[in-house]
Image: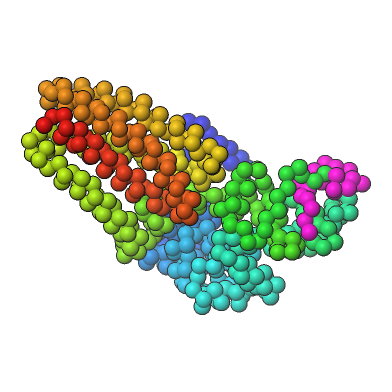
Amino acid sequence: MSENTQISAEGPKNVREDDAYLLNRKNVSAILYAVDIEDKAKLSELMDPLHAADIADLLEQINEFDRSRLIRLYDREFDGDILSELDESIREEVIGVLRPQVLAEAVRDLDSDDVVDLVEDLRETQQEAILEVLEDVDRAAVEQALSYPEFSAGRLMQREVVMAPEHWTVGDAIDYLRGSDPDALPDQFYHLVLVDPRLHPIGNVTLGKIMRSKREVFLTSIVEDVFQIIPADQDEGDVAYAFNQYHLISAPVVDGEGRLIGLITIDDAMAVLDDEHEEDIMRLAGVGEGSLSDRVIETTKQRMPWLAVNLITSIAASMVIAQFEMAITKIVALAVLMPIVASMGGNAGTQSLTVAVRAIATKDLTSANVWRVLRREVLVGLVNGLIFAIVMAVVGIIWFGSPMLGAVIAAAMVVNMVVAGFAGTVIPVLLERWGVDPALASGAFVTTVTDIVGFFAFLGLAAMILL
């Protein structure tokens, strides 16, 4: 097995790749045992090597009773980064368990964007409890960020920005950075943002270019070629797209007058992109935005609406079948074979739908290429339909000894696969143009179309040809 080398205070040591993730079943059991016997020293020993994200995962995996006991035993060492990593579904519960002084210390260590992310979904009383422990400047920054629309760049940005006047040289920037109070600078940053006298951002300079340039070089001569300015009211999904599209590391955020008010970094943008992808997958399956920590009632409420929609569409498909009751009664083989046609069409439609929804989300499917993509999906459906039509024709002949039955199911298969490719592309495009999230609503409509067309084509052809 391949090995990685991990550097620690004791020197390098070899660890297996499957040990790189420190939170495993053995560790969880040991941690819960330390909680059971209330061994605070042992708990700290086990928890100290864990990353904040690992501790957040641990808290999400265990039940509410064990979670409460662990937090109370570990509280003095509770890190603000753990709160940032926690799933929103249990974050409020964890904050309620923490003692006020522990919560205050944890929150003070966070950057402004992390504090905003922490408090925006809490009840007003808990929001106020967290805001009260912040220094006046930090509180004002967080409250200003909360004044921007939800899911906007203003909510996503951090207020800690390292800026420099446009007339500075590399030497001026180095002297400023070395002479500044460490608490006045972010813990991590990638760029100096150059601003004009009105605080309008005009360029980014990477720390790498600063370190390898001579002191007398003007910062304006080593700015990054790619420079994007983000309006504070821009949707965070568009922000994430810009970071991914233009390979940005950080980007300045400006107010309505173009003045620099904050900064968005790649980690926050990629977190939004990840959330958007996860949301699309969940919505395509009709399960909403729930998590593993949600209670039964909450999960039921999230899933029930789309199950109800599915019930209605299933009834519509059944009404089509009812129109051919006589044919099914006379030829029982139709009842055996018709689910195959509908199932193949449904799967083909889901494949086209998934491709289309993903392409819409990444802005790859536009009015400029929609007809080309539609033509491709229809042709793919036609080719696949012909291939599987031959297979089902042979099955119909061998299984039921009827060449005409084989021909009917083959023809129905081709029709439904073509329609599936068409519907799987057209429906999400139309929904997106009508302002409806295609990931949320497309699945039910595509399934309905393929079921109805599949049943109608197969049973209709059977009634005309075989009776």
Side (left or right) of 384 relative to 53 = left
Image coords of residue 32 (percent x, y)? 40, 59
Q: Is residue 275 above or below residue 120?
A: above
Q: Position of residue 186 (x, y in %)?
A: 71, 59
Query: Residue 406: image x %, image y %?
Result: 19, 25
Residue situated in front as seen by the camera: 143 or 102: 143
Query: Which of the 4 quarters of the picture holds residue 77?
Result: bottom right
Q: Position of residue 346 (x, y in %)?
A: 31, 40
Q: Quadrant of the C terminus?
A: top left
Quadrant position of residue 30: bottom left
Q: How is the image coloured?
A: rainbow
Residue 189, placed above or below residue 404: below
Does the segment drawn in magenta span residue 399?
no
327 w.r.t. 432: above or below: above
Judge whether residue 48 can be spotted in this image: no
Relative depth, front residue between 101 and 180:
180
Q: Residue furthest front?
A: 464
Horizontal side of 304 relative to 51 (left or right) equals: left
Q: Residue at x 55, y 68 (%)?
A: 119
Q: Give 188 or 154, whichever is nearer the viewer.
A: 154
Where are the magenta residues, as a range?
Answer: 200-221
Give the side of residue 224 with respect to residue 276, left or right.
right
Whether 214 is among the magenta residues is yes
Which residue sits furthest right? 216
Tell me what residue is drawn at x 36 percent, y 54 percent.
Answer: 287
Is residue 393 among what the camera can see?
yes
Residue drawn at (31%, 25%) of the image: 386
